[in-house]
Image (cartoon, helix red, strand yellow):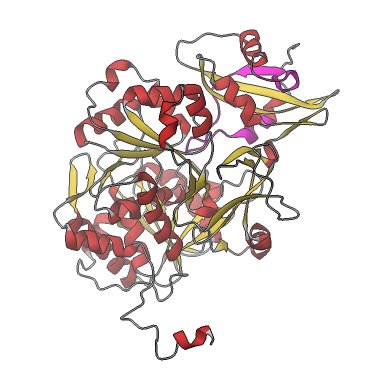
Amino acid sequence: MTAGHYDEGLPKTAANYAVLTPLMFIERAATVYPTRPAVVHGDVRRNWSETYARTRRLASALSSRGIGLGDTVAAMLPNTPEMVEAHFGVPMTGAVLNTLNTRLDAATLAFMLTHGEAKAVIVDREFSGVMREALKSVPQPVLVIDVNDPQYTGAGESIGEIDYDSLLASGDPACEWSPPSDEWNAICLNYTSGTTGNPKGVVYHHRGAYTNALSNILEWDMPKHAVYLWTLPMFHCNGWCFPWTVAARAGVNVCLRRIDAKTVFDLIRREGVTHYCGAPIVQNLLVNAPDELKTGIAHKVHAMVAGAAPPAAMIEGMERLGFELTHVYGLTEVYGPATVCARQAEWSELDIGERARLNARQGVRYHLQDAVSVRDSLTMEPVPADGETIGEIMFRGNIAMKGYLKNVPATEEAFRGGWFHTGDLAVAYPDGYVRIKDRSKDIIISGGENISSIEVEDVLYRHPAVLAAAVVAKPDARWGETPCAFVELKAGAEVGAEELIAHCRKHLAGFKVPRAIEFCELPKTSTGKIQKFELRKRAGSVAAIDV
């Protein structure tokens, strides 16, 4: 007997099979919870029925202007209602949403618009100047749609053929739309940061967006009607798929144009925010805010942090706020987070230092990710789960990109051996958790010894005066490379290089101690990640200290 007999007379039909797409989440939210709040932005308050109607208007209006299957619609927007709507209205037409990093320069934006063959771009007035300049270098015609957000009071002008509200007014709120014919169809295009050369275009498919959106719910035990604050830019990995996650839970999108501690705490109190995401810099901003800003929050707030591992000081600070911190890890190519440091009940009995060590790990695979593994990048064999042997973190499963747009060699290399190669070096533990040791390009090789920049940074973060730290390689005539630390201090804190070096000596082998320290504000991306490539350029000129 073969498996074939289970297919005989048992066809795949519309009755028993539907493609997986996160677009179905908003239709359900509007049908089941039409009057529940969906979007809050200043004085703007809309329910799910109204929001669904607006996304259908957007889809209808774009379709009437010739935008459809496989076309690209770019969005140069902060975290406003229009960005939420674009995550549904654009792919409802069959088109692909390309969310643009609002901190990019005109030349980089022009490359993305050209490479992605954008047929339209939705532009907030704040970014009209850089977008006008970028469009001068784009060869194809682009429909420019202006957004005039009343929350924005700065400079800017209309540069488009039509404004967003007029565009929606021309659309049908009852527009009939269809899910994609294939869940493998592209839903979004995201560009990597491109620190060297042009950025790569990462293509997401409907199936991946669907599965990661649901995994977010499962990892966070996210309830119905959660109130989600948009501290994480929606342009970054499509907000880690949370525009679709919030719709799946019929939650509330609390929009936020720009992060500052007072506004965040005010919104948490006023709107009853239950969940938010952010890089370590965002969590540090809140932990180190003046005490008077933090009062009056009586409910549990769930915070998700990605990027650098949360140090003990951050975990303690979050606990004092009454915030529960979840550590996740991922990359643009895996839709944002794809592993989670799943907490075990017995960890709560441990001291803060041991809890910080355990929570610093990147953890285990997301529920709907097939696998995460630490492997030898050449042999593709898994490394021993001993917490010591270094390999490369690799992913496999539905929560992985289709590939890089118009870049077959890079796609083949990324998926070599049937796994997605992250480029992050890590170890595996006997309990199945993984922990990053460094990016392959960030390992410091000093006198033939490998030094993890993350290990040195973890020690620096333990000093009470340190707000942020980054360690890179500094060329050295004798050792080849030595660690060079760039340190940003907390407001009002004072500490000298010698004190920090003495602090490091207590916790690190001598060859790992930084031999140069510079105090400065660290350069960061729009998502709060420290730009180490900028610091590498400066490391050679930082004066060495005799350690």
Quarter of the C terminus within the rendering: top right
Q: Position of residue 353 (x, y in %)?
A: 50, 22
From which residue to which does the magenta span run? 508-536
Q: Which sits in the foreground, 506 or 190?
A: 506
Residue 247 appears left or right of 66: left
Q: Residue furthest front?
A: 1
Q: Quadrant of residue 68?
A: bottom left
Q: Residue at x 39, y 87 (%)?
A: 10
247 shown above or below 152: below
Q: Position of residue 1 (x, y in %)?
A: 53, 87
Number of numbered discs visible in the structure rendering: 0
Residue 234 appears left or right of 410: left
44 shown above or below 529: below
Q: Residue furthest right?
A: 478
459 shown above or below 197: above
Q: Residue furthest left?
A: 35
Q: Position of residue 118 (x, y in %)?
A: 47, 62
Q: Which sits in the foreground, 310 or 38?
A: 310
Specify whether residue 318 is painted magenta: no
Q: Is residue 136 visible?
A: no
513 shown above or below 413: above
Q: Which sits in the foreground, 297 or 91?
A: 297
Q: Residue at x 62, y 31 (%)?
A: 454
Q: Which sits in the foreground, 157 or 177?
A: 177
Q: Quadrant of residue 451?
A: top right
Q: Position of residue 134 (x, y in %)?
A: 50, 50
Q: Is residue 317 visible?
A: yes
